[in-house]
Amino acid sequence: MYPLLPLHLLLLFFLLPNAKCQTCGDTPSYPSGSFNVTLAGGNNRTFQLFTPWTEYECSSFCVGPPQEKRPLVINWHGCNAHVPVVAYQEQISRIEQSASDYGYYAITPVGSKEDLIDQFGWNTVGIQCGKFGEDDFVFAETLLDWAAENLCVDTARIYSTGFSTGAFHSNGLGCRMPNRFAGIAPIAGSFGRLYESECKQGSPVSVLSFRSRGDKTVPYDGNFEWLGQAEVTSLWEKRNGCTNETARVTYESETTICKRKECPGAPVEDCTLTGLDHCWVGGRSGGFESPGSCAAQPGDIDATKHMFETWEREAQHL
């Protein structure tokens, strides 16, 4: 039988991790919780932070907030009145669950409240669902700066995903801030047609989109205001340098097909479902059109699982 260590020595194992784990210097280790940032104009904005707790190779006792640089995913909720919006977004996406499995930080920002409607959301490329005058690109940039300064984040592996309006915002961030994101994964969102020309040129960024032909809220084929998914995919392929590359099927079932092109700048993958409502793909039951319309059907891809697996594979080539 091994002798029991005194309490003060056990505490040292936990509080003073091995030096070879210290790759982030004096960066503080923030636990999971709610935080605020102040934007350049003086507005305070709120976000939820998930911090992964992982075991390190340095010691079996070296368990806690990351001291080795870890990826970050920012998860933008849709335009809705489901208060608290952060809890609702995690319910449908299960991003924090996967972040825990893979050792990612996760940030879920809180949208500003519309002036005349009791909804929270984003002012972005083709949708205005926040307080008039709020600049959610400035919010995103402030969050990125805060994470780089306060978390042990691998700044080469920051990703953006989101649902509905949050998907519009992820597309917009990939368009305007490609050098700050390794990839984007918009779900059930598009681009405003007025912003199409702005995004045709710029640095490449990895794109993984999820859309359903049965979506009546953000129509798959687009409308006078928003691009259809074929147009969105074409925009990203051209921006990422694709010309005659052949699309490779990465997932296929009776309800879903995902096609991926390895463009010279960065890959573009498009997952199309049939019959699903305006939903986080593979998420909760319930939906916008009728109860149960977001219930996963046999063959439906799990968007959250697929995006994390894709990011992990792509990271091997960074």
Image: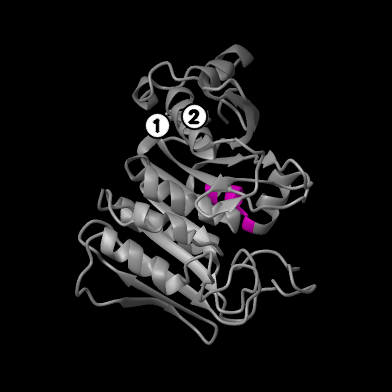
Q: Residues within 10 Å of mark 2 (few under 14, many from 20)?
A: some
Tally the numbered discs: 2
Front residue (pair 156, 64): 156
Q: Is residue 97 magenta?
A: yes
Left-right relation of 42 to 125: right
Instruction: Specify whether 17 is left or right of 8.
Output: left
Q: Secondary structure at mark 2?
A: helix
Q: Which amino acid, mark 2?
A: Thr
Q: Quadrant of residue 164?
A: bottom right
Tags 1 and 2 touching, CB below 8 Å:
no
SS under mark 1: loop
Q: Residues within 10 Å of mark 1 (few under 14, many from 20)?
A: some
What is the image's colouring? one colour
Q: Which residue is mark 1?
A: 68
Q: Residue at the location (53% across, 64% down)?
A: 225
Q: Earlier in the sequence, mark 1 or mark 2?
A: 1
Q: Is residue 157 visible?
A: yes
From the viewer's perspective, is 266 left or right of 281? left
Q: Residue furthest top?
A: 8
Across and down, in percent, residue 289 comes to: 75, 73
Q: Is residue 277 magenta?
A: no
- The magenta region covers 93-99
Q: Which mark is residue 142?
A: 2
Q: In which image quadrant can residue 42 be found?
A: top right
- Residue furthest bottom in the image: 254
